[in-house]
Image: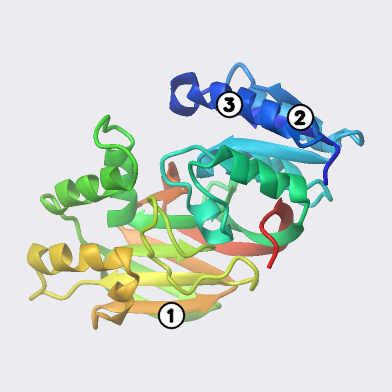
Amino acid sequence: MPRRAVILANPLARKGAGLTIATEVERLARDRGITARVVSGRDLADAQRLAREAVADDAVDALVAVGGDGSIRLALEAAAGSTTPVGIIPAGTGNDLARTLGIPIGDLEGSVGIIADGHARAIDLGRVRMESGEDVLFVTVAATGFDADVTVRATTMRWPRGKARYLVAALREVSKLQVRHFTVRVDGDTVVDGDVLFTAIGNTTSYGGGMLITPDADVHDGLLDVTIATKTPEVGKGTLLRLLPTVFKGTHVQHPLVRTARGATVAVESDPPAFVSVDGDIVGRLPATFDTIPGAAQVLMPRG
């Protein structure tokens, strides 16, 4: 069991609700015998600084992240390469890493109980290398094309909440569907060179609150799973509308227009350049190279 923990609350998460949840987590942690304190930066950069300071402090046994996948990524970036484990309190829109690891959503006592149990295991992190030379880490899925366009729209919507927001955003994006020419190479081999609707690169199975875009991805295998939805002239919006609901079951990968691949390095370019989103945040445009950092960070997760 960690004896001392720092609880990181994203100051921008859910209009301040993240800090309220973090305070309750602090109380629950103390009830389990963990000395805890809450930190929340003035802005994202300050929160990143506080996370790095917590990891560098030898007196801190665990860094606990409160929020969605973006907030958790911030903590994992700070802890990457260290022995400090990250505890996860899912309190965001998607919470897809928590789903992957079996951490309960909407159950603060259950999540704190996993942290108190102290079972740490290494997970992989994904990395995007932009043409500008900037590197961005990701925890769940990196998306391009239609997927990222949906993310752009979803982040501007106030209603609905949760995974329904992404479905509504996707339906709205279908109305102005844009097809791009993609070249996708996995470990140097060309998988697709043609018209594509989207390409998703998964470190975990899902994004958008349980959409199983890369259903066979594994955060422990040191590889990335790739799902590519290709486009042929006879395929219209109706085909995409029928395909969208199947993503929640992961059965879309059985469709003849969908290609899948797995590898350590994925190079993607498109014409015109498509947005790239990671963990629900837009980070730039293609071209980009995606790879993994195997066992990059320790995460406190359920035993078994």
Q: Which mark is residue 44?
A: 3
- Image x and y of residue 181, in percent: 27, 66
Q: Which mark is residue 190?
A: 1
Residue receiving disc 2: 30
Task: Identify the mark nearer the N-term, 3 or 2.
Answer: 2
Residue 301 vs residue 243, the one in the foreground: 301
Q: CA distance from mark 3 to mark 2?
A: 27 Å
Give the label, 3 or 2, closer to the camera.
Answer: 2
Residue 95 vs residue 139, the one in the foreground: 95
Is there any visible trace of residue 279 in the rendered image?
yes
Q: Can you tell which quarter of the image residue 39 is in? A: top right
Q: Can you tell which quarter of the image residue 2 is in? A: top right
Residue that extends furthest to the right in the rendered view of this protein: 58
Residue 88 vs residue 272, the one in the foreground: 88
- Image x and y of residue 257, in percent: 24, 78
**Identity, as a three-letter code, of the amino acid under mark 3:** Leu
Residue that extends furthest to the front in the rendered view of this protein: 31
Is there any visible trace of residue 48 in the rendered image?
no
- Left or right: residue 137 versus residue 32 is left
Instruction: Please say if 16 is above or below 232.
Output: above
**Identity, as a three-letter code, of the amino acid under mark 1:** Thr
Q: Quadrant of the C terminus?
A: bottom right
Give the label, 2 or 1, closer to the camera.
Answer: 2
- Image x and y of residue 10, in percent: 57, 28
Instruction: Please say if 135 is above or below 54.
Output: below
Binning the other alpha carbons within 10 Å of mark 1 as few (below 14), some (14 to 19) or many (20 upward) gives few
**Identity, as a three-letter code, of the amino acid under mark 2:** Arg
